[in-house]
Image: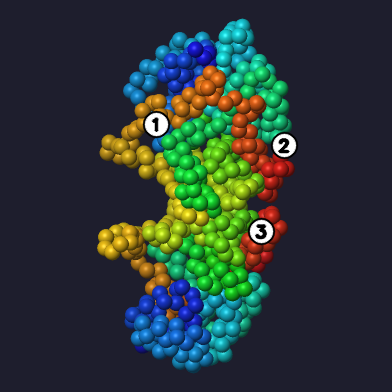
């Protein structure tokens, strides 16, 4: 039985705790939740595609309540580890945008406990270098894959590209739109924006797309970003160049007022064809009137599958990284933030290695 | 009373489209098609029941010409038209270099002839509605613009850098930059370009990604790549989204489409067919009306110079690997 401490915003922690509960080989040893009074439904507001990760089980509220009441609650990760006497925790799950939890990541790595975290692990070069260094010196390790990698949609896109289905990539395109205050995939980034700023929040979203793009097309070599902020909404676009050729654009926009429905559009164009996906394709596949209904069973949601992969690594059945895996998406985000600030393309070799 | 119109050169893919439309336009007489390739010119002329002739013969016979040659030949044909005091509707871009485009613009201004660019998207009804909505103030302060104008790789002289002035950047930057300028009244002030040749084995770029800044500070992302697969059921797209302080609005020039799946023969076949009002037809009617003095040209050669400046800045950005200011 793997003993997990979940750290993050309250809604994220509850959602993750409930997912751990699905597995027979895991238990939530403790939770460190911030924003205790939040009543945001993480399943509707998490930082991933609603369409590929939907789970509207009617038992969800009951399950959340159960986990929230049964898992010991702590004020901080050091307190949770101390309560566990340092020997009673197998893994730490940093839920939600990892950038808001640098302290938790450092604490986990210093304690030598393996940790799972949503990318990016850091937004600035100094923090990033420190975390990579901590991870390499730690007995633990850090996995920071985007849950997108574990979704059926991205998995299908990835395998089609890998099998030569569209030939070498020419242009990949990602568009994301969401309301700021939910329901949507980016509510948890509201906190990032409040603490760090709109550029940081938008770059945090970008990390997920970079992770999936690098997984599919190889390392990003160069990034150029423009970011805009307004009372109504924030916007960023990124132009990426892959080391092995091909280019990509990612556009991210979220709104405070006149909010649109959450929307994700993905298109991969290659020498021998094109793949494209729009969230509407999935969200309308099963619906009652105009209301989309979930299709996938809980065990198929991408975040649940990401957690399963983490548990497998803890159990030794999955490969264990020596330090941070993958580090590159966070490195790209550090470069993206710099590009936005300095209005120039940033080549990844300029960033820390 | 009709206006005599000719099509000058059959090299451009739109020459055939314009010929078919002009042959049915009540306000115009398609008096001829000219070209260096005698056989191809004859075939095109026969197809629409008009005469094949030399460029000089055509200039003497018409009130206005539609210049459909390779871009590098525009200047020579426009000068010929100027010598005959003939109105000009020119395919984009105006020339292969910014300096040549400026020179043409200035010569046409001196002669005071009708000189218009083939920017049919200005005649697209969704785009016209978008402009109306923007001008009404509904969008508010512009925050960002996003546009796509992807298409199939056209081949032929379009992939000859000498004749076309480049690849996808030269071919697919004009329309959306022009329409955004037209709608918003803002100019592109800075361009960062990422290009590549990934889809075809050609000597020019087929990837065209431009990150721009407008004069009001709004960001502007444009994908003008030749990334539409040759077997795609529709040739490409032309879309614009405006994000403002009050609302976000978008327009899809070719959003009106239906599908045709044909189940005969041995080859699978399906096609998306545009059923909306034809912007090319409106473009030609606008040209005829301008010759008659009934309206001003929709897109002037000065507009063409401004998009040519963006294209030049994009290529300079690729060369320098950084954002560059647009010099008009």
Q: Quadrant of residue B5?
A: bottom left
Query: Residue A252 at x, y = what percent?
Result: 53, 43
Q: Residue at x 56, y 83 (%)?
A: B78
User: Is residue B129 in sight in this rendering?
Assistant: no
Residue count near mark 2 (Cα–Cα under 10 Å), binned few <14, some 14–19, many ≥20 = few
Query: Residue A199 at x, y = what percent?
Result: 61, 39
Where is B62 relative to A230, above or below? below
Host chain of mark 2: A
Query: Residue B192 at x, y = what percent?
Result: 64, 55
Q: Is residue A120 left or right of residue A58?
A: right
Query: Residue A170 at x, y = what percent?
Result: 54, 53
Quick one: SS at disc 2? loop
Q: Residue at x 63, y 40 (%)?
A: A332
Residue ID for mark 1: A54
| Residues at marks 3 and 2 touching, judged by CB atoms closer than 8 Å | no
Res B318 label? 3
Res A352 label? 2
Residue in the foreground of this view, choosing between A260 and A313: A313
Instruction: Give the CA distance from mark 1 to mark 3.
Output: 42 Å
Quick one: SS at disc 3? helix
Mark in the foreground, 2 or 1: 2
């Amino acid at each position: 039985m793997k003993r997990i401490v979940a750290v993050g915003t309250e809604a994220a922690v509850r959602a993750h705790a409930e997912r751990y509960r699905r597995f027979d080989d895991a238990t939530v040893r403790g939770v460190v939740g911030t924003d205790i009074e939040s009543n945001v439904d993480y399943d509707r507001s998490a930082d991933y595609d609603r369409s590929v990760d939907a789970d509207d089980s009617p038992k969800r509220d009951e399950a959340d309540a159960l986990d929230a009441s049964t898992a010991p609650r702590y004020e901080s990760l050091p307190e949770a580890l101390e309560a566990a006497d340092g020997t009673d925790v197998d893994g730490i799950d940093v839920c939600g945008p990892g950038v808001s939890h640098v302290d938790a990541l450092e604490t986990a790595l210093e304690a030598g406990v393996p940790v799972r975290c949503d990318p990016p692990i850091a937004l600035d070069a100094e923090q990033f270098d420190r975390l990579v260094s901590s991870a390499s010196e730690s007995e633990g390790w850090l996995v920071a894959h985007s849950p997108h990698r574990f979704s059926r949609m991205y998995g299908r896109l990835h395998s089609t590209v890998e099998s030569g289905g569209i030939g070498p990539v020419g242009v990949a395109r990602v568009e994301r739109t969401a309301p700021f205050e939910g329901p949507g995939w980016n509510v948890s980034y509201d906190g990032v924006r409040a603490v760090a700023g709109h550029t940081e929040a938008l770059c945090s979203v970008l990390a997920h797309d970079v992770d999936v793009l690098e997984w599919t097309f190889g390392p990003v070599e160069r990034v150029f970003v423009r970011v805009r902020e307004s009372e109504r909404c924030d916007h960023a676009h990124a132009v990426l160049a892959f080391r092995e050729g091909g280019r990509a654009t990612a556009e991210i926009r979220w709104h405070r007022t006149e909010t649109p429905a959450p929307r994700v559009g993905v298109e991969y164009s290659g020498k021998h064809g094109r793949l494209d996906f729009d969230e509407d394709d999935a969200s309308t596949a099963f619906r009652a009137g105009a209301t989309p209904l979930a299709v996938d069973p809980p065990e198929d949601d991408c975040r649940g599958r990401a957690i399963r992969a983490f548990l497998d690594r803890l159990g030794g059945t999955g490969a264990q990284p020596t330090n941070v895996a993958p580090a590159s998406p966070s490195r790209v985000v550090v470069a993206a933030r710099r590009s936005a600030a300095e209005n120039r393309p940033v080549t990844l070799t300029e960033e820390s290695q | 009373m009709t206006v005599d119109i000719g099509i000058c050169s059959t090299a451009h893919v739109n020459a055939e489209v314009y010929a078919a439309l002009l042959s049915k336009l009540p306000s115009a007489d398609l008096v001829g098609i000219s070209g260096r390739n005698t056989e191809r010119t004859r075939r095109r002329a026969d197809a629409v029941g008009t005469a094949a002739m030399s460029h000089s013969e055509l200039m003497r016979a018409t009130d206005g010409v539609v210049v459909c040659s390779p871009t590098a030949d525009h200047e020579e044909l426009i000068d010929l038209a100027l010598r005959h005091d003939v109105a000009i509707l020119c395919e984009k871009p105006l020339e292969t270099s910014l300096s040549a485009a400026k020179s043409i613009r200035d010569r046409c201004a001196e002669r005071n002839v009708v000189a218009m660019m083939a920017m049919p998207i200005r005649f697209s009804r969704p785009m016209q509605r978008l402009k109306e909505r923007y001008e009404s103030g509904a969008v508010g302060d512009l925050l960002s613009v996003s546009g796509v104008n992807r298409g199939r790789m056209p081949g032929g002289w379009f992939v000859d850098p000498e004749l076309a002035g480049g690849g996808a950047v030269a071919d697919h930057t004009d329309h959306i930059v022009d329409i955004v300028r037209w709608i918003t009244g803002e100019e592109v002030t800075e361009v960062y370009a990422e290009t590549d040749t990934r889809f075809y084995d050609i000597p020019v770029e087929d990837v065209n990604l431009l990150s721009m800044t407008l004069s009001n500070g709004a960001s502007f992302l444009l994908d003008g790549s030749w990334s539409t697969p040759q077997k795609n059921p529709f040739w490409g797209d032309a879309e614009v989204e405006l994000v403002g302080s009050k609302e976000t609005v978008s327009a899809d020039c070719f959003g009106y489409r239906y599908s045709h799946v044909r189940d005969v023969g041995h080859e699978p076949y399906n096609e998306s067919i545009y059923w909306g009002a034809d912007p090319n037809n409106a473009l030609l009617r606008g040209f005829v009306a301008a010759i008659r003095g009934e309206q001003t040209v929709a897109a002037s050669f000065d507009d063409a110079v401004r998009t040519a400046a963006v294209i030049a800045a994009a290529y300079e950005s690729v060369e320098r690997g950084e954002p560059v200011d647009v010099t008009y």
